Image: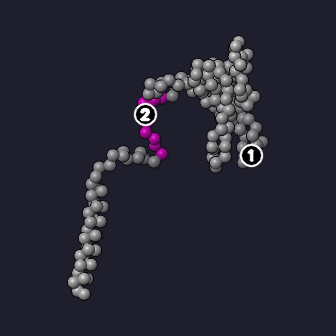
Amino acid sequence: MKSELRIMAGVVGIGVALGVYSALAQDRVPSTVPPPPPSGERPKGDWKKPDMVDLTLTGKIIKGEKEGRGGAMEAFYSLSETTGGTIVLPAIPRHSPSRGETPGAVVPAPEAPAINYEDFVGKDVIVTGKGYTGERGGIKSTHLEQVMKIEVVAAPAGAK
């Protein structure tokens, strides 16, 4: 009986020693993940947002849906350019019923008119607005920050 207790105590002691050793060994292994930046700070890259310029883009407005906050589906609009690219149109700011405003009413930016993208879905259009083009990582992109005007154009001859 005494020898069985000694064996049990030895097994438990070895288990505790191995657990402590492995915990200490993990602290000595250098981490490959960089430490997170201090709270509230984001690492800064060498990319800066270019100055806004006037842009005129042509294409067809497409409506899509994505999952928004709370799992509800939200509509978004994009411009499928005639050159083959796709540009996401900026969201339309709307009044909030939680602030006692008319729900869903469009809030235009001070210098931009209120535009309802739904009126132009599936039509060939010319979009005039403010934005910028840039290159990042060898990929060229166009970002439209503000839509000033959308004009419907006649479909090119031979198009269906």
Could you say where residue 33 lies in the image, as x and y percent from the top left? Answer: 36, 46
Q: Amino acid at mark 2?
A: Gly
Which residue is most to the top? 157
Q: Is residue 59 magenta?
A: no
Which quadrant of the figure contains the N terminus? bottom left
Mark 2 crowdedness (10 Å alpha carbons): few <14, some 14-19, many ≥20:
few
Can you identify the residue that label 2 sits on? 45
Q: Quadrant of residue 120?
A: top right
Q: Residue at the location (55% across, 24% down)?
A: 142
Mark 1 crowdedness (10 Å alpha carbons): few <14, some 14-19, many ≥20:
few
Q: Is residue 73 above or below residue 11?
A: above
Which residue is most to the bottom? 1
Can you identify the residue that label 1 sits on? 97
Q: Which residue range is magenta in the image? A: 40-48
Q: Amino acid at mark 1?
A: Pro
Q: Earlier in the sequence, mark 1 or mark 2?
A: 2
Which residue is most to the right? 102
